[in-house]
Image (cartoon, rainbow, N blue to C red):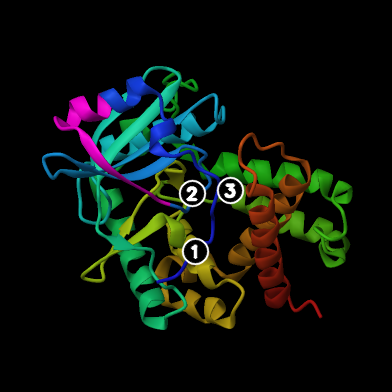
Amino acid sequence: MSAPRAVGARIPYTAVPVRVRAWVEATVGSVVVETHEQVGGMSPGCATRLVCADGTRVFVKAVGTELNPHTPVLFRREVLALELLGRHPLWAAMLASYDDGDWVALLLEDVEGTHPDLSSDAEMERLVRQTDELTAVMNERVPSLASAVPADEPHALYRPGPTDFAATTRGWLAAFDHHHEVPSDLMPAWVLARHDSLRAMAARLAEVPTDSVVHFDIRNDNLVQRVDGDLVFVDWGAFGRGPDWLDPLVARLERVDSTWFDASLSSSPTLRAAGDDLVTACLAAMGSYLAWRAHTAVDVNLPTLAAFRRKESRRFLGAAARRIGVA
């Protein structure tokens, strides 16, 4: 078992408002008698395995705007994702959801298992294989997100739409205009020296087709490995539209700082079709964007997020440098 790479500071279930805990017990139909707090992920809300008096076991995650103004948006997007996708062994089933305009909670299947050890070649290969399966199932269940959630339908914080990779890449591009403002311990000199060429590479990302349904947040703390070895994908707050190669790439980022990453790209038909330059552009754009955000973002009740961004930025930019051939 490996520890989760992203670990925030969560409240315990007992700190969740009484009205939300009353909803949990009314929905389950039994009183909660045991709580087992979980770590992993950046949400400041609770992530708790519950045992009820009648033996029922469920998993609850809950957060309110008082903890962080944006996290409830991610939870609402997760509700949207699981409503559209329905049930499948590849993800934890949503049993019910709660939203009072302030606090949002999801009651989910409690999957027995732990985070996978992705330092194991066998487990990493399992992740790659099951990510391909996830992509196929998601796009079979939701052949067109545009039809399922029309782009012209009004969305607000209370009812967010899916994420859009094209919009994400525009944010990455905008960050290039601020690279010179980022301290040198975050923004390597080679990135600044190649600013124009890297920006031109990243601009291609905004032009790729985004007609696939994507999870977009696959990493070890968003995975649970069942007792039988199969993986379960959790945390759907980044669910949305993207290129068909996106989730295969994101899954492989677990080992982006090793040559395994480069060699593994050829095992994915969609990544082969995308090409090495697009992958490198992604790494450089994500890495430099995270460096800028680590320097400028104000993260309410997310005390470990800046350090996580720094770490991921170093990994992504290091991989981009390796692939470009920067000495």
Residue ID at (75%, 79%):
325
Secondary structure category for the residue under label 1: helix
Residue 207's tag is 3
User: Which residue is the site of mark 2?
Assistant: 209
> Where does the image place residue 96, in percent across and percent down from the top left?
24, 32
Q: Quadrant of the N terminus?
A: bottom left
Question: Observer-nearest residue: 104 or 77?
Answer: 104
Label 2 CA crowd tier, 10 Å (few <14, some 14–19, many 20+) = few
Label 3 CA crowd tier, 10 Å (few <14, some 14–19, many 20+)? few
Which residue is at a point 55% across and 30% down the rendered structure image? 67
> Between residues 122 and 190, which one lies in front from this camera angle?
122
Where residue 75 sits, quadrant-wise, is top left
Q: Amino acid at mark 1?
A: Leu
Residue 245 visible in rendering: no
Quadrant showing the C terminus: bottom right
Q: Which structural element holds mark 2?
A: loop
User: What type is the residue that disc 2 sits on?
Assistant: Pro
**Residue drawn at (34%, 60%) of the image:** 224
Q: Earlier in the sequence, mark 1 or mark 2?
A: 2
* Residue nearer the viewer, 265 or 122: 122
Mark 1 or mark 2, whichever is nearer to me = 1
The tag on residue 249 is 1
Residue 32 picture location, percent across and down: 23, 36
At label 1, counting other C-alpha atoms closer than 10 Å, the crowd grade (few under 14, some 14-19, many 20 or more) is many
Find the magenta span and give its range: 23-38
Q: CA distance from mark 3 to mark 1?
A: 17 Å
* Residue 314 picture quarter: bottom right
Q: Earlier in the sequence, mark 3 or mark 1?
A: 3
**Residue 111 shows up from this direction:** yes
